Amino acid sequence: MSTNPICEMLGIKYPVIQGGMAWIADAELAAAVSNAGGLGLIAAMNSNGEQLREQIKKAKELTDKPFGVNLMLMSPYIDEAVSAVCEEGVKVVTTGAGNPAKYMEQLKSAGVKVICVVASVALAVMVERMGASAVVAEGCESGGHVGDTTTMALVPQVVDAVNIPVIAAGGIADGRGMAAAFMLGAQAVQMGTRFLTAKECNVHPNYKEKVLKAKDRDTIVTGKSLGHPVRALKNRMTRDFQAKELDPATTPGELEKMGAGALRRAAIEGDVKTGSCMCGQIAGLVNSEDSCEEIITGICRDACALLGRSLEE
Ligand SMILES: Cc1cc2nc3c(=O)[nH]c(=O)nc-3n(C[C@H](O)[C@H](O)[C@H](O)COP(=O)(O)O)c2cc1C
């Protein structure tokens, strides 16, 4: 697959990227994905420079393949995180939750490829002008923070609007989804939900089990009124949050407080009742715990068979 532009750009074998997932996408998951031929990403989330550096060093011990870092631009430690990425020689970052303009020059002059996660055509065009190497067009089926356009509608519109490669994300978990993304013009896929149940994923077993048991309509989006909607599995947390959100007496501050620490509670402590189990709509299709290698080779093999061609073209 070396002539696939994303594979060539990133030095990877398969055009499959593991999405950054706060509290979940650690060095072990990233290294396992990279060892399997995809691109693993360490989620920087709110880590300070030292914490991120530790994860990068750990990933380097676990793999000699390329891996990247997902930068959360709204992190209070974003300056330190960007410096850590540049100094540790990380070759690629994905950016989410904000505008990467301030860091573009620093990253690019350190030889870091910048891939921006976008939920709209306007943002895709803007980051291309800023010098992004590729975009991840992420539809609202996805887990975590979401926009409001579906993958099916967003990907071809982004493909038509930019000249850089487009990676499709949101609702992709098998070869059919990957083949569909390629038909829409994407040149790679990014998956989060599918990797939540990977054998090498260290998310709490309670969370993993909830994803494995989820059906098609088991996720819900809350937080629209705050301007940052989040998709998660329905549970007591989302029910309470939704009730509060619909109550005109609730202040934004109260809602922010309810959401704070909720993903950590579910992913690390295993509290899947009052924690937030962020997860995409495709969870209903994710029914087995597989290794990253099984996931990546399986999805690429099936996509190739459906497309009747390799993923290089
Ligand atoms: C639990 C969870 C946490 C996530 N955290 C982040 C994050 O920290 N940064 C980010 O850019 N995207 C984050 N995402 C989005 C993923 O990187 C990916 O784009 C998305 O999961 C793709 O959609 P899918 O879940 O349908 O595969 C998260 C997704 C999930 C499921």
Image (cartoon, helix red, strand yellow):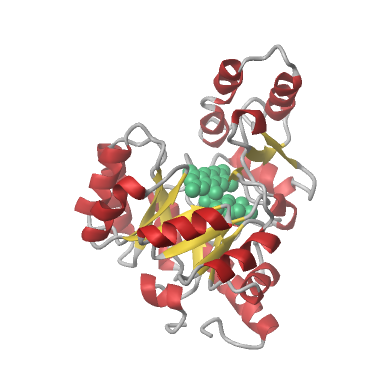
- Please determine whether, in this image, residue 169 is positioned above or below residue 24: below
In the rendered image, is residue 113 in sight?
yes
In the rendered image, is residue 193 in sight?
no
Q: At which x and y percent is residue 153? A: 69, 61
Q: Residue at x 74, y 46 (%)?
A: 214
For this orientation, the residue located farthest to the left is: 87
Q: Residue at x 58, y 35 (%)?
A: 228
Q: Is residue 36 left or right of residue 110?
A: right
For this orientation, the residue located farthest to the bottom is: 308
Comparing 31 with 45, the one in front is 45
Q: Quadrant of residue 138?
A: bottom right
Q: Residue at x 29, y 42 (%)?
A: 81
Q: At which x and y percent is residue 220? A: 73, 39
- Please determine whether, in this image, residue 281 is positioned above or below residue 166: above
Q: Is residue 124 left or right of residue 278?
A: left
Q: At which x and y percent is residue 296? A: 55, 69
Q: At which x and y percent is residue 262? A: 56, 28
Q: Is residue 303 left or right of residue 98?
A: right
Comparing 183 with 278, the one in front is 183
Comparing 162 with 310, the one in front is 162
Q: Residue at x 64, y 45 (%)?
A: 279
